[in-house]
Amino acid sequence: MILQRPYMTKLLLLIEKYNLFQVMRYGLVGICAASTHALVALGLFHHLSAQPTLSNFAGFVSGAVISYLGSYYFTFKSTDGHGTSLPRFALVWLIGIIVNVGLFQALLDAYAIPFALNVFIAIVLTPIAQYLMLKFWAFKK
């Protein structure tokens, strides 16, 4: 069943009110960044026989570049210069790593949450925290 016109209007108003298109763009950028990270890391490790940690680090850096450029130009459509946005973005990413690892370890120590569930929780909560920091601080308009 196709939504009637008044319901479509209400739905579009809700999407606009809560800026859900921006959230969707953030998710798309995240998928591209994570895919780039994985492809670079796997490619270096399997095809060029690079050391595992170096492969993963190169993947992480390449994913971070995609994430920054995608966030700057597509998600938040920033008009600030890179001199302002890039250092803030880098700090948000560092905080994100600390949140991810810290949350993972805290849940493991305090509640002995199974590994897979713990990874899932960290993967879900870290991007939410990063989105809020990027939106309200790094790329604040």
Image (cartoon, helix red, strand yellow):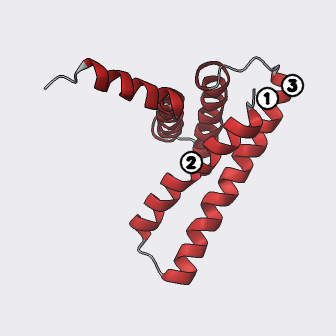
In the rendered view of the protein, which quadrant contains the C terminus?
top right
User: Looking at the picture, which amino acid does disc 2 mark?
Assistant: Ile
User: Looking at the picture, which amino acid does disc 3 mark?
Assistant: Gly
**Separation of disc 3 and disc 2 at Cα?**
25 Å
In contact (CB < 8 Å): disc 3 and disc 1: yes
x, y percentage for residue 138?
76, 35
Name the residue: 50% across, 53% down.
123
Name the residue: 56% across, 48% down.
128
Name the residue: 78% across, 44% down.
91
Location of mark 2 (residue): 128
Location of mark 1 (residue): 85
Q: Is residue 54 left or right of residue 46?
A: right
Q: Earlier in the sequence, mark 1 or mark 2?
A: 1
The quadrant holding residue 65 is top right
Q: Foreground mark, 1 or 2?
A: 2
The quadrant holding residue 61 is top right
The quadrant holding residue 137 is top right
x, y percentage for residue 109?
57, 81
Q: Residues within 10 Å of mark 3 (few under 14, many from 20)?
A: few
**Separation of disc 1 and disc 2 at Cα?**
19 Å
- Determine the secondary structure under disc 1: helix
- Determine the secondary structure under disc 2: helix
**Separation of disc 3 and disc 1 at Cα?**
6 Å
Location of mark 3 (residue): 83
